[in-house]
Image (cartoon, grey):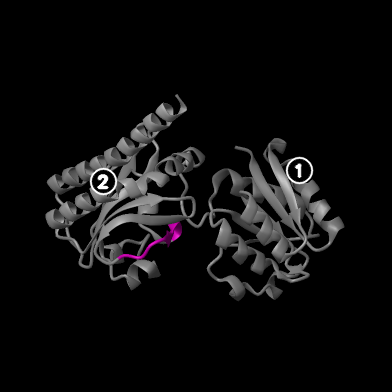
Amino acid sequence: MRASILCVDGDADRRADTAEVLSSVLSGDMEISQAASVEGARSAVASSPVDCVVSEYALPDGTGMDVASAIREHRPDAACVLYAATPHEEVDTAAAEEVVVEFVSRGRDGSERELRSLVESLVRMRTHTAYPVPDDESGRIAAVETYRPLVDDASEALDRLTDMAAAHFGTSLTCVTLMLEHEQVMLERVGEGLTPLPREDTVCTYAMLEDGVVVIEDLEADPLFAANETIADAGLRFYAGTELVSPDGRVVGTFCVMDDEPRSFSESERSMLARFGEEAMEQLELRRRLAARTGTEVER
């Protein structure tokens, strides 16, 4: 998939200059689009994927920080760069404290080279994403969309599995989830849980990158999740989860158990949780095969 960069500036000539500066990024293997305002940027990212947004600070209907906030709403995994004539000390970063934004001073000696290098690094490494993304994310999302229409048909079977898991592990929350492009939805659950959740707020976003069962005995003591307000507000302290892996190896979701107290998780419990995950995936895959067979028969 080719990289996509959005240049935002109210000045058409300056905007075109920025696009030209970036034209050699990734040896030209990317697409550059343009917008003249905050609303224009919002519309652009809502309609198509964007890997990196490069914006002037002062815009006709707001600031580059407003652009960064708008990008986060639609494309939280996109990188944001202010390429601005406005001095850094005059940039109101408090307007979007939750967003990671890089700054390059326009017009300074070497600024064009610095901008190209930074954008290429951000696009290649995705080091400033709001959450980690698997290498096969586009294929993974396609797999998720294959199973998503089948959720209602699988609901009863998944409900039984979560009931059995809750009884077996004795946890306060047990759930089967699908991880969509920007949010996690719980298909079935036992216990109180919020759904949908932004991907960056979920433990499963990180757990799905690991093979096998992931156990975090105390979320409050884990440096990755200690400051996560969503987890803290839900009163969750313990997490164990395993991936739902499609036959072609795509991780479409998780089967996880959580609790309001820290606890250990034995090897036998890990093995049992993996079996619950495998069964949940099999239930979804069974519906997919039946739907495919029905579709073939209808075509005949």
For the point 74% across and 71% down, which residue is it?
61
Indicate the position of residue 165 as horizontal and vertical percent values: 18, 52
Q: Does the magenta-highlighted stretch encompass residue 196?
A: yes
The kind of residue on which mark 2 rests is: Val
Q: Residues within 10 Å of mark 1 (few under 14, many from 20)?
A: some
Q: Residues within 10 Å of mark 2 (few under 14, many from 20)?
A: many
- Look at mark 1 in the image and give the residue it sits on: 23
- Camera-side residue: 72 or 265? 72
In the picture, measured across the screen, residue 286 lies left or right of residue 272, that is right
For the point 38% across and 50% down, which residue is it?
178
The kind of residue on which mark 1 rests is: Ser
Q: Is the residue 139 above or below the residue 154 in the image?
A: above
Q: Does the magenta-highlighted stretch encompass residue 294?
A: no
Q: Nearer the viewer, mark 2 or mark 1?
A: 2
In the picture, measured across the screen, residue 147 lies left or right of residue 52, that is left
- Camera-side residue: 44 or 261? 44
Q: Is the residue 152 above or below the residue 249 in the image?
A: below
- Look at mark 2 in the image and give the residue it sits on: 213
View extreme (top): residue: 300
Q: Is the residue 298 above or below the residue 56 in the image?
A: above
Indicate the position of residue 225 as horizontal and vertical percent values: 36, 62
Quarter of the rendering occupied by the C terminus? top left
Q: Quadrant of residue 262?
A: bottom left
For the point 28% across and 55% down, which residue is it?
175
Which of disc 1 and disc 2 is earlier in sequence? 1
For the point 37% across and 29% down, which residue is it?
293
Quarter of the rendering occupied by the N terminus? top right
Image: magenta residue range: 193-200
